[in-house]
């Protein structure tokens, strides 16, 4: 499975485990290989799982579309207002986001959350996305 698909298909798992992810630097600083960007300003800074989770949990007004689906890909034009943002629906499918606000506002909010997780602690090596998923889906009843 492609890394982007692995990411968006597990968004609900990440949201459901937000506290655990944000409490563990190895999970929070996990790199997310999604190339977000705006036409006039270029690529947004590299994303981390902690930045996404923080954004979805603490900024629902900018991180969700009109149906409440979490946005996972940000792309658009600041000048025209057009966008190609994607969100994930309740079945785990990636769909075009129906944004209630400008793509520029969404990108600014996303950057603020990502900024909190831009410098990996020197004493920590982040997990990969697959490792985080494995840790969150381990059956603890064994």
Image: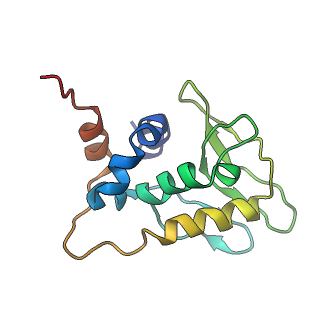
* Residue 60 picture location, percent across and down: 64, 49
Q: Give the quadrant of the N terminus.
A: top left
Of 2 and 141, nearer the camera is: 141
Of 89 and 33, nearer the camera is: 89
Residue depicted at 29% across the width and 45% down the height: 132
Residue depicted at 19% across the width and 28% down the height: 140
* Residue 76 picture location, percent across and down: 74, 59
In the displayed structure image, the side of residue 69 where residue 5 appears, left or right: left
* Residue 46 picture location, percent across and down: 48, 67
Q: Residue furthest left?
A: 142
In the displayed structure image, the side of residue 20 where residue 140 appears, left or right: left
* Residue 131 picture location, percent across and down: 25, 45
Residue depicted at 47% across the width and 41% down the height: 15
Residue depicted at 48% across the width and 35% down the height: 12
In the displayed structure image, the side of residue 108 where residue 35 appears, left or right: left
Q: Give the quadrant of the C terminus.
A: top left
Of 130 and 110, nearer the camera is: 110
103, above or below 15, in the image: below
């Amino acid at each position: 499975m492609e890394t982007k698909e692995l990411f968006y298909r597990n968004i609900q798992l990440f949201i459901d485990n937000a506290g655990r992810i944000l409490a563990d630097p190895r999970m929070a600083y996990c790199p997310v290989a999604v190339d977000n960007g705006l036409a006039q300003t270029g690529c947004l800074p590299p994303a981390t799982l902690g930045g996404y989770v923080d954004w979805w949990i603490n900024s629902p007004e900018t991180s969700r579309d009109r149906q409440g689906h979490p946005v996972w890909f940000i792309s658009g034009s600041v000048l025209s207002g057009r966008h190609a943002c994607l969100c994930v629906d309740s079945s785990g499918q990636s769909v075009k986001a129906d944004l209630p606000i400008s793509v520029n506002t969404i990108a600014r909010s996303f950057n603020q959350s990502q900024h909190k997780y831009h410098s990996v602690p020197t004493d920590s090596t982040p997990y990969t996305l697959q490792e985080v998923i494995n840790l969150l889906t381990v059956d603890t009843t064994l």
